[in-house]
Image (spheres, rainbow, N blue to C red):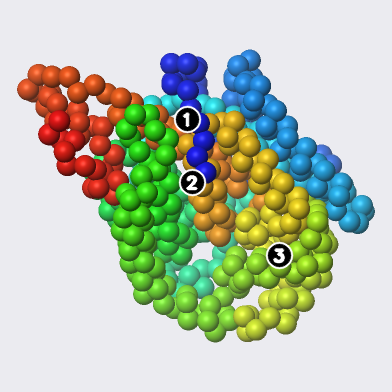
């Protein structure tokens, strides 16, 4: 699935210092995940991202395209109809809270997208690389300096009401040392954000051989953070190479070069397999625990959400249990945890909301087959209105990261989708600009025709497959 490309930057408002500051605040808010609860019991997750997003809404509201507004309202209409269609109206107040959170997450994610797509590729790539470097440096400080770790732990204890990870003995058993958290509530959020920011840099970078640099970043991340979420980063290599890296450069074409895509997918798949083999070796103790049924974290992220989703679709195929209908799932999830063959240890059940952490499967649990499909179509319509170059790219990125995070109505879930949309548009704009660069003679110190031809050559595997005759024209 491909879409019309975004209009040139000169046809849109250019991003300035204020946009940059708010985008950095938004990403910081997504990273930290600090939440507050409003009167009435409505939780507002990622409040720093919310502040930045709402300020960006006011900044961009005067120039809001009508197509964006119509597509966004259609998404919200589908979500509203889904909560009215679900059974057990006693849960309608909780569903309404979920609808408020979902609307909030979409609005601030969309506002961030409006600014992020306007930044130059080099600046945006530098921002994500700086974020990756800052996370690595912070983790090393937390490992090497007890005082810094104490500050991180004090911060976590002060700002997070629940969900603060303190299973240090488990870390020592599985990973040989306590994993860093770096001001987040748990190590999985740290590795999730690191992988997300590293992947954004990978898509935007024009560095030759960037695929190997990206995999190197993931390897260094593993040595420092020891998080299995990093393995998902290797699976994203073929997603980029096929849906963005192999797009044609000639004549403004928006299609994909099939031959190049197949070769790129094969090479990227080979590297992804190497990553999985590495992960198998690196997480041998963790995998042994999964097979033996001693890993409740893996069970709650991978096995339980899929099992509950299939059971829910059988019982409520039309509308699921309703948006954030956790209370309707408590008995079902408790029974699954008590009777499953994939979990051999007794667990203190803390409610369905804390025991199903996979936002992809939550889509089908909450909305059912009919409304879940309707929401995907409505969101795809919004992505088309935003002029993303590839729907497949955006949804593939969203699904892959969904295997490592829950919170379907939270900002982190939809920030992934809007980040994928923004970086794909910036990538496509740079690709088209490079393809349209005239190969006029230039001074020798600038490299002349050869340098300009190489500038138009794509990076990554697609760059390795570019026609050699390009350099001789």
Residue under pointer 2: 393
Residue 470 in picture, x, y percent from top left: 19, 35
Rendered position, 120 above or below 374 = above
Q: Nearer the viewer, residue 65 or 419?
A: 65
On the question of residue 21 being in view, the answer is no
* SS at mark 1 in the image: loop
Residue under pointer 3: 309
Q: Residues within 10 Å of mark 1 (few under 14, many from 20)?
A: many
Upstream in the sequence, badge 3 or badge 1?
1
How many numbered dots are placed on residues in this image?
3
**Residue at image coords 13%, 19%:** 441
Residue 266 in picture, x, y percent from top left: 33, 60
* SS at mark 3 in the image: helix
Closer mark to the observer between disc 1 and disc 2:
1
**Residue at image coords 68%, 40%:** 378
Residue under pointer 1: 5
Q: Along the horizontal axis of the image, is 77 left or right of 168?
A: right
Rendered position, 114 above or below 154 = above
């Amino acid at each position: 699935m491909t879409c019309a490309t975004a209009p040139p930057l000169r046809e849109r408002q250019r991003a300035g210092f204020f946009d940059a500051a708010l985008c950095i605040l938004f990403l910081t808010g997504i990273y930290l995940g600090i939440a507050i609860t409003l009167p009435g019991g409505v939780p507002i997750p990622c409040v720093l991202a919310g502040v930045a997003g709402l300020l960006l809404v006011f900044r961009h509201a005067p120039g809001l395209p009508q197509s964006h507004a119509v597509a966004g309202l259609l998404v919200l209409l589908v979500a509203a109809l889904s909560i009215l269609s679900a059974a057990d109206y006693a849960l309608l107040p909780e569903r309404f809270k979920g609808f408020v959170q979902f609307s909030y997450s979409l609005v601030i994610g969309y506002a961030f997208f409006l600014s992020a797509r306007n930044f130059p590729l080099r600046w945006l790539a530098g921002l994500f690389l700086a974020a990756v470097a800052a996370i690595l440096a912070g983790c090393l400080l937390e490992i090497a300096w007890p005082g810094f770790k104490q500050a991180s732990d004090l911060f976590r204890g002060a700002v997070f009401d629940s969900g603060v990870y303190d299973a240090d003995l488990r870390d020592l058993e599985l990973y040989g040392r306590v994993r860093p958290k770096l001001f987040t509530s748990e190590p999985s959020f740290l590795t999730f954000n690191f992988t997300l920011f590293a992947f954004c840099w990978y898509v935007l970078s024009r560095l030759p051989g960037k695929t190997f640099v990206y995999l190197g970043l993931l390897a260094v991340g593993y040595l420092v953070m020891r998080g299995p979420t990093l393995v998902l980063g290797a699976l994203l290599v073929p997603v980029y190479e096929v849906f963005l890296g192999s797009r044609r450069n000639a004549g403004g074409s928006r299609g994909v070069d099939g031959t190049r895509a197949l070769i790129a997918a094969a090479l990227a798949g080979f590297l992804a397999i190497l990553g999985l083999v590495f992960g198998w070796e690196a997480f041998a103790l963790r995998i042994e625990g999964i097979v033996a049924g001693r890993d409740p974290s893996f069970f709650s992220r991978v096995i339980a959400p899929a099992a509950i989703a299939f059971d829910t679709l059988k019982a409520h195929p039309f509308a699921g249990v309703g948006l954030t209908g956790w209370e309707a799932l408590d008995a079902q999830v408790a029974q699954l945890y008590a009777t499953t063959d994939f979990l051999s240890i007794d667990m203190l059940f803390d409610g369905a909301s804390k025991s199903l952490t996979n936002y992809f499967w939550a889509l089908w649990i909450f909305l059912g087959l009919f409304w879940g499909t309707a929401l995907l179509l409505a969101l795809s319509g919004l992505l088309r209105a935003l002029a993303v170059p590839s729907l497949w790219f955006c949804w593939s990125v969203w699904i892959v990261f969904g295997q490592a995070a829950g919170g379907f109505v939270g900002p982190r879930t939809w920030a992934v989708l809007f980040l994928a949309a923004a970086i794909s548009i910036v990538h496509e704009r740079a690709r088209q600009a490079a393809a349209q660069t005239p190969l006029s003679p230039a001074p020798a110190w600038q490299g002349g025709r050869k340098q300009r031809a190489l500038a138009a050559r794509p990076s990554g595997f697609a760059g390795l497959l570019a026609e050699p005759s390009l350099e001789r024209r």
